Image (spheres, rainbow, N blue to C red):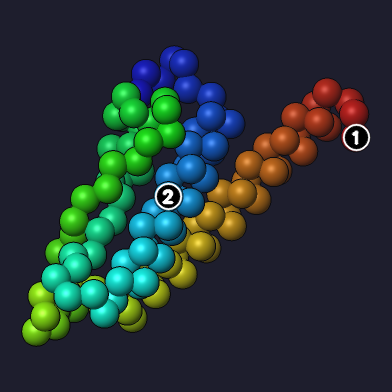
């Protein structure tokens, strides 16, 4: 990502997109916790997302991920507790990013004299 053309609002918007897509992937993992041979997935890191040309189109790469929590006999490696922790962390990060984005807009309104 070229720093000279980076907008704070654009980066914040991309972060919100990345977080919402990660939450969807984690929810899909949880939904398939009892599906035989289902492999847990996760999105690419936010840094990789920002550096990928697809980020300009809002596309987040999804790949299979290993787990240190183990797997079941049927080949499913989704551990609901692990996915729930990741989902809670992602939700917290989304709330923080949304608040920062909103505060940025409020600061712009104050600077423009509309508040």
Q: Is residue 104 left or right of residue 114?
A: left
Q: In 3D space, how far apart are the residues under numbered discs 2 and 1 (Cα atoms)? A: 34 Å
Pick the residue in front: 50 or 22: 22
Residue receiving disc 2: 21
| Residue drawn at 28 percent across, 56 percent down | 42
Asked whether, in this view, residue 40 is left or right of residue 53, the answer is left
Residue reaching furthest top? 4
Dot 1: few (<14), some (14–19), or many (≥20) neighbours within 10 Å? few
State whether residue 54 is above or below residue 67.
above
Above or below 53: residue 41: below
- Please give left or right for residue 57 compared with residue 111 in the image: left
Q: For the image shown, how many numbered marks are present on the structure?
A: 2
Determine the image quadrant of residue 103.
Answer: top right
Residue 65: % across, % down: 18, 59
Instruction: Choose the circle earlier in sequence order: 2 or 1.
Output: 2
Q: Residues within 10 Å of mark 2 (few under 14, many from 20)?
A: some
Q: Residue at x 83, y 32 (%)?
A: 110
For residue 115, the mark is 1
Query: Circles 2 and 1: CB distance less than 8 Å?
Result: no
Q: Is residue 82 visible?
A: no
Tag 2, which secondary structure? helix
């Amino acid at each position: 990502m070229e720093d000279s053309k980076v907008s704070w609002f654009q980066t914040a918007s991309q972060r919100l997109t990345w977080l919402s897509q990660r939450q969807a992937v984690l929810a899909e993992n949880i939904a398939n916790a009892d599906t035989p041979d289902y492999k847990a997935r996760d999105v690419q890191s936010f840094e990789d997302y920002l550096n990928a040309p697809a980020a300009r189109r809002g596309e987040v790469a999804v790949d299979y991920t290993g787990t240190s929590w183990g797997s079941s006999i049927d080949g499913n490696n989704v551990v609901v507790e692990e996915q729930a922790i990741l989902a809670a962390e992602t939700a917290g990060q989304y709330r923080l990013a949304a608040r920062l984005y909103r505060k940025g807009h409020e600061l712009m309104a104050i600077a423009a004299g509309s508040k």
